Image (cartoon, grey):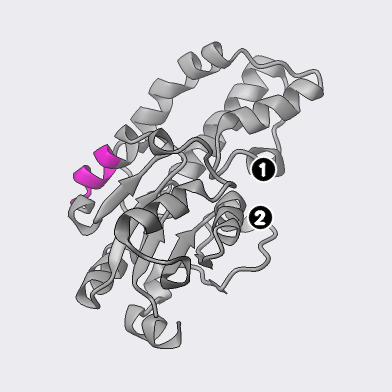
Amino acid sequence: MLKTIIMDFDGLIVDTEVVWYHIYVEWFRRKKGYDLSVQEFLTCVGSNSEDLFRKLDAKGITVDRDAFAKDTSAQFIEQSSHLPAKPGVEDFLKQAHENGLSVALATSSGRKKPTVHLERLGLLSYFDLLVTAEDVVRIKPHPDLFLKAAEKLGSTTEECLVVEDSLNGLLAGLNAHMRVLVVPNEVTKYCQFQGQYRLCNSLAEVDVARLIAEF
């Protein structure tokens, strides 16, 4: 029986991944004379930039992490500060609560960013719990975020549905032995997803009551 929905944030609730992708591509082209591919960028989607930077280091493209953060952080904040919620998100959250489900957010980022955006969009009250990188030792693709959310909400792994947009998120859900609904965005649509419970183009396509009946 479905009891808990555990949702990612970046690229699922707000389309921040597309903003980051364009910032990364521009920075590498300008600072390194390097054309970063979408497949390379996908390395860090759902996880963190260090996974990408280590791979580039091995190719001789060294990234000063502090300089990168200084060059890009303010730009990201400016470009993402007015992003709307993605289509279907608020209705999906409303349906979840109308059907008696608990809802958690589980993100590989820190707590401040999703909290600010969820408050701005009037969505924070829909979440019973926020679990972030500050709450676990390992982030996605490790299962720790999802397992922590389930534990705190008193649900078994079989009672949880993970909703994700990235391959690292899907892997984290599978590693937690949870079913995963994948909703790709304009960047993560290039991932090769395998093993998901279901894949759809938008949360606007999802009827929560039907999801519960079929779970």
Amino acid type, callout 2: Tyr
Residue 168: mark in rendering: none
Q: Position of residue 111 (x, y in %)?
A: 33, 36
- Name the quadrant containing residue 150: bottom left
Q: Quadrant of the C terminus?
A: bottom left
Disc 1 marks a residue whose amino acid type is Val
State which tag comes first along the sequence, 1 or 2.
1
Q: Quadrant of the N terminus?
A: bottom left
> Eyeballing the image, is 32 above or below 23?
above
Can residue 11 be seen in the rendering of this structure? no
> With respect to residue 199, does 86 lie above or below?
above
Q: Which secondary structure lies at badge 2?
A: helix
**Callout 1: SS:** helix
On the image, numbered disc 1 is attached to which residue? 38
The x, y position of residue 178, in whole percent, is 52, 65
Q: Is residue 186 left or right of residue 156?
A: right
Residue tagged 2 = 190
**Image location (x, y in percent) of residue 189:** 61, 58
Mark 1 crowd level (few <14, some 14–19, many ≥20, 10 Å Cα): some
Instruction: Decide which of 95, 103 is in the foreground and name it.
Output: 103
Q: Is residue 72 visible?
A: yes
In the rendered structure, does residue 121 fall within the stretch colored magenta? yes
Question: Residue at the location (48% across, 22% down)?
Answer: 72
Q: Residue at x 50, y 63 (%)?
A: 183
Contact check, label 1 and label 2, Cβ < 8 Å: yes
Q: Nearer the viewer, residue 163 or 28?
A: 163
